[in-house]
Image (cartoon, rainbow, N blue to C red):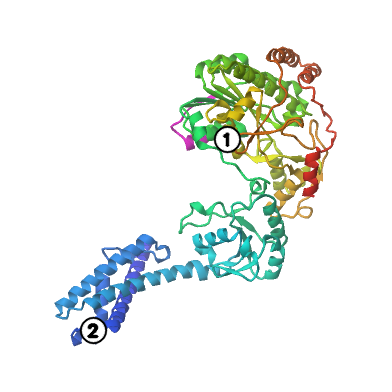
Amino acid sequence: MAECLRMTRTIALNCMLDTVLGGLAASLAGWACGYQVPVSDRVLAGGVQVLGMAGLGVAGWPFRVFQQHWRFAGQSDFWRLGGACALASGLVLGATDLLGAPAPAFGMVYGMAAFVLLAGVRGGYQYWRQGLRGLEGSQRVIVLGDGEDASRFLALVPHMGRRVAGLVLEGRQRRPGRRLRGLPVLGQAGDLRAILAALGADENWMVVVADPHFRGERLSTVLRMAHESGTPVRCMPDLSGLTGTARAPLHPVRLADLLPRQPVAPNEQGLASMLRGRRVLVTGAGGSIGAELVRQIARHAPAELILLDMGEFPLWQVDIDLEAMVPALKRHLVLADIRDHARIEQVFARYRPELVFHAAALKQVPMVEANPCEGLLTNVTGTRIVADAASRHGVRAMVLISTDKAVNPASVMGVSKRIAEMYCQALDARVRRAGGPEAMRCVTVRFGNVMGSTGSVIPLFQHQLVRGGPLTVTDPRMQRYFMTVSEAVGLVLQASACGTGAQEDQLAAALLRRGGVFVLDMGTPVRILELARQMIVLAGLRPGRDVQIHFTGLRPGEKLAEDLFYSQEILQPTGCPGLRMATPRTVDLAQVVNIMDALTVACRHGDSAQALDLARRLVPEFVHNPHGVASQVPAGQADVERNAS
């Protein structure tokens, strides 16, 4: 009842205000053209206002003008106003004709004046609510970006444009003293510290990065300068998809925004050609890489999706995601151990996959060091079992997810992945040299760390931050390559399309015949110490004051820096952005098989020493670091470290 009374009161108030505006419009029309209108004296004596109020009062109901919410009036509401004013104009014309004083000019001017008044009042109210009133106690904005980005930001997001105090630009407009769209140019991005100091702390300031390409080290520098003065920084993605009425999707600076590289988008057409209508199996589907593989594959309409993992809970989680994304997709949840030969044979015989993405692995370096036989059995023997089963059951292609730790390995995990690479290389090289179009292709994709993956440093830092610190870094010189999990998986799929022929690339095909592996372009390595500092700043805290950073020393199997390829290799470009190819040393398939047989036997008997000796026979460059002794940073990466310092 109270809600009904409130609504009735609001409609009555709107009706009264709009009809009063109708009377005012009639007065204005009479004043504007009264000397031309041969109306009777009684109309001129006061009936003009009554006529205008009555006309709009009657015409407003069919168009529901009085039910409009002024604060949220949009384009359709203004069209309704136009219709109501046109009808009111017609009614007034008819009334003056009945009174014996036809006044067509008066009626037309009245309709236009009524529309201007009604629309103007609504627009003014919105401006007051969103603009002038919204500035009280709100944050003032400094927009950072080039002239084009700032101009588009102001045009598409007017509700924030009224709060903009100035622009920090790059390009020709960067000189202070110039103006853009009526706003002062304060200087360049490098001047932000001085700009914020000059503006003072009397007002609540916020920096909005409107340039979607302002990322990496440049953004990190801006974040540090703003953080010193306690000024928050917000970022905006590409504005091209926004409409004039859309609100800016501002978000805090994310860790991925600070990576020293620009993301690369895969070729969606090539991926669709490879995946659409196929039966696809993903091993390790519950892990961070496997789950993202499943999600991205599902978007390309495979016929069936087979999710294989040892863990019940992570498999259930990814299935929940798929149910929300693509409920109609036919999928199968398979609990299986890739080291179980009989179970894997059963899975392939039942589901007959056409594509296999092998992401199942043990990846946590210190844990694999503590359990070397388990790591070798999973990463080496398990990969061989999956590859052999795929080959026997007519799989079109198998994709092995590898790691930069396989290059010059110092850990059991790294050498196990290098042996898995070698086995898949040997299988693939034999098939490609034979030229059999029906034989299974083996595609190996190698990349570095992905942000947020299970067991990686970023979740560890997040956990430590929640507890108030300290953040633990093994060594101040430690550095790693990083990429977001979504981009890494997108490029894995891109490499798969390139390696299986779904996307033509003659250079890649030639390198694959020589045992080539795909290497993702990871940009430049990131120091873990700098990563820890950035995460503290992103949490709104100060490194060394609010949260401490402690150095713990290298853990077993760790290196100060990883490599994506061997020093004697020259990375070759491919026809796909973000993908390059390396051609590491290959061995004969029979030789790999003989040593892998012996390695499996040693692991099943728990003889880790014998297993590691066999691993060294296959990978002579394996220099085990079981005690976490720090080695020198490679020369090329040492330069990066000096520059970062």
The quarter in which the N terminus is drawn is bottom left
Nearest the camera: 351 or 239?
239
Per the model, the C-alpha gap separating discs 1 and 2 is 75 Å
Residue 101 in sight? yes
Q: Which residue is mark 1?
A: 292
Q: Position of residue 414 (x, y in %)?
A: 74, 28
- Name the residue located 69 percent from the left edge and 66 percent from the top edge: 196
- Quarter where residue 623 is shown: top right
Residue 379 in sight? no
Residue 324 on the magenta segment: yes
Q: Secondary structure at mark 1?
A: helix
Vertical comparison of 150 with 502: above or below:
below
Mark closest to the chain's N terminus, 1 or 2: 2
Magenta-colored span: 320-333
Q: Position of residue 488 (x, y in %)?
A: 62, 37
- Asked whether, in this view, residue 301 is left or right of residue 316, the answer is left
Q: Which mark is residue 36?
A: 2
- Name the residue located 51 percent from the left edge and 64 percent from the top edge: 159
Residue 364 on the magenta segment: no
